[in-house]
Amino acid sequence: MAVGTRPTTRQGAETVFVDRFCDGIIGPSSEMLGPVRDGGHIVANTAPGCWGPMITPAIRGGHEVTVPVAVEGAEVGDAVAIHIRDISVTSIATASGNDRMVEGRFNGDPYCAKVCAKCGAEDEATVVEGIGPDSVRCANCGEPAAPFAFTNGYTIAFDDEWRVGVTVGRDGAEAFANDAHTAGAIPANSVQNPILLFAPHDLVGVATRLRPFMGQIGTTPAVDLPDSHNAGDFGAFLLGAPHSHAVTPEQLEARTDGHLDVDAARAGAILIAPVKVAGAGVYLGDMHAMQGDGEIAGHTCDVSGTVTLQVHVLKGLTIDGPILLPVASDLPFLARPLSPAERARATEIAQRNGLSEIEESLPISVIGTGPDLNSAVDNGLTRAADLLDVTVPEVKNRATITGAIEIGRAPGVVQVTFLAPAKALARRGLAELVRTHYGMA
């Protein structure tokens, strides 16, 4: 090859930059960027996920996620390991809180079927007039358009290093509302109305820490879904729904559970996602500045930010939903790998009781989703059993004595986290990935 020429056999790009967003629907009809090469990087500028899109009827899915990126070589029946290399917040403030639905402004589902209460326009364009809860109005008739309002809300400002945040009073909230796009660092291609416009200020002077993670990260489902409904709990709202996004139970099985809201999906973690459409279609969004387990208020602090991912195709790893390899410090106490001293002591106990060796076990966290938490646990247990080719009762035992069930989001996202037998993971081609991730190689 002549000096200065480039090879022509590789089609995938080393890095794909993403600064564009879906209109709220994610699935086979979605445009795909790329492809990025197997082992390459995706760098994205993401927009706030929940409240801004929730008060923007023209965003049809309830969130505003990135246009998916195809991964070279990813075929249906494979999986993609998504290494979360970096997550950086760019908003200097945001607003959030517990919500209530505004009757008359939606058809069955306020996230994905908005309707103007006055003129009847669906998924209507809006204009902004002033600030406050009625600032977002139908562009056609001028009627207030937001299908959600706060029951208890707050505006929170961040320090210059994005380490801590403090909820502000009325004056501070209104100052941010009057410069909402700048304070929220809303990306240029985003069409959402920033939630800072509403200037909520029920909580004042509450301080907290930031630890950002991705509420939406994963692969494209095999059926078109509102992006916020690509999960077993929100997706259940589409069954028998009166609007155009309704699906059947069989269609909902094509979801990929990209809407996780699991706080362990942060920098340093690896998410293993199923490939259910050719190219996988990796997408992301809904960055959260922080969140306690369960997202119990229904929403947390949605922010803009930049994200760097690295992707690797796992050929032939057929899985139904995501598997997470959290940062080691995020593992439940019982799911953390034994130290050399603990392992030596366990081996001694085993030999004392007639065993020649102890099992080599590695931590995994299987995501389960469903219409409620019990259903989500059942889903996660079944997925884990299928992954390891063992029974559900065995997984229950392992999760009880070597792990935990953690709530990602109420009403129905959980992590089934436990120490899994290395031999079973090796049969699925995952053992070396897990060992390397936890420094056990």
Image (cartoon, rainbow, N blue to C red):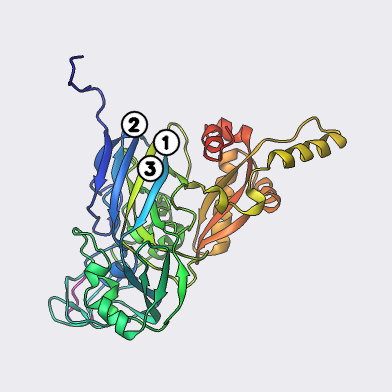
Element at label 3: loop
Q: Are marks 1 and 3 in contact (CB under 8 Å)?
A: no
Q: Which residues are magenta?
A: 117-122
Marks 1 and 3 sit apart, C-alpha to C-alpha, by: 8 Å
Instruction: Tell me which numbered mark, 1 or 3, is placed earlier along the sequence.
Output: 1
Q: Nearer the viewer, mark 2 or mark 3?
A: 2
Say whether residue 398 is visible: yes
* Residue at 41% in and 70% down: 165
Depth check: give the residue in front, 349 or 341: 341
| Amino acid, disc 3 | Lys
| Amino acid, disc 1 | Asp
* Residue at 26% in and 69% down: 183
Instruction: Tell me which numbered mark, 2 or 3, is placed earlier along the sequence.
Output: 2
Residue to which mark 1 is pinned: 78
Say whether residue 399 is visible: no
Label 2 Cα neighbours within 10 Å, binned few <14 / some 14-19 / many ≥20? some
Q: Are marks 2 and 3 in contact (CB under 8 Å)?
A: no
In x, y percent, where is residue 348? 82, 36
Q: In the rendered view of the protein, which quadrant contains the C terminus?
A: top right
| Amino acid, disc 2 | Gly
Judge left or right: residue 193 versus residue 255.
left
Instruction: Tell me which numbered mark, 1 or 2, is placed earlier along the sequence.
Output: 2
**Helix, strand or loop: magenta stretch:** loop
Element at label 1: loop
Mark drawn on residue 276: 3
Residue furthest front in the image: 160
Magenta stretch: residue 59 in it?
no
Marks 1 and 2 sit apart, C-alpha to C-alpha, by: 9 Å
Element at label 2: loop
Mark drawn on residue 73: 2
Location of residue 114 (image quadrant): bottom left
